[in-house]
Amino acid sequence: MATTLFITQTDLKANTILNGNVDADLFMQFIKIAQQMHVQNYIGTKLYDAITTKINASTLSGDYLNLVKDYVQPMLIHFAMVDYLPFANYQIRNGGVFKHRSENSETPSKEELDILVQKHRTFADFYATRFIDYMGINASAKFPEYYTNKDSDMYPDQKANPCNWLL
């Protein structure tokens, strides 16, 4: 079954340094991974499923639309970049694993790439913290699914994991 994504490739490209010409096939799986691993970790399975259902039925509106637009999507955009950046230079073809090099550019060092990843992690953690704070005030009244997880569901992580790096 296909995963309903909470952002589009356009959202990712418009809100990051990702060039508009980058082939979506190179990063779409990282949106899915970030959504399932990071975002679902913060919103929990039941709210994740509720948002998915509303997107699929084209009924995402009101408080749910605001939640997704203001909190979930910004968090997802930056977690997707955290997951994508370490793989951005690499491709696997019939002949093996290749590191892409352009004639007019220079490949960043590992340290430079680590800084980019860390910056996106900082952005994602900022939005995760905002989400957690918002849900602490509004979940009971507006998003009952947030508290209805059980058994093997992912329970919402109510603590962000901010990194204490100063960049």
Image (cartoon, rainbow, N blue to C red):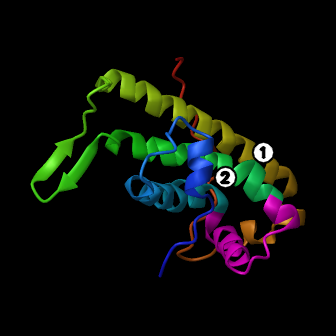
| 63 left or right, relative to 1 | right
**Type of the residue with mark 1:** Asp
Residue 53 belongs to the span the image colors magenta: yes
In front of the other: 111 or 94: 94
* Residue extent of the magenta highlight: 44-65
Is 10 placed above or below 124 here?
below
Q: What residue appears at the point 26 percent right and 44 percent down from the top-left corner?
A: 90
Q: Mark 1 or mark 2: which comes first in sequence?
A: 2
Q: Total of numbered circles in the picture? A: 2
Give the number of the mark in front: 1 or 2.
2
Is 2 placed above or below 117 here?
below
Mark seen at residue 133: 1
Q: What residue appears at the point 74 percent right and 42 percent down from the top-left corner?
A: 130
Is 29 placed above or below 130 here?
below
In front of the other: 154 or 123: 123
Q: Residue furthest left?
A: 95
Q: What residue appears at the point 81 percent right and 70 percent down from the top-left corner?
A: 144
Q: Main secondary structure of the magenta part?
A: helix
| Residue 158 seen in render | no
Q: Which residue is mark 2?
A: 73
| 56 left or right, relative to 33 | right
Q: Position of residue 94 (x, y in %)?
A: 12, 60
Q: Residue furthest front?
A: 103
Is 107 placed above or below 144 here?
above
Residue 118 belongs to the span the image colors magenta: no
**Type of the residue with mark 2:** Gln
Q: Position of residue 83 (x, y in %)?
A: 43, 46
* Secondary structure of the residue carrying numbered label 1: helix
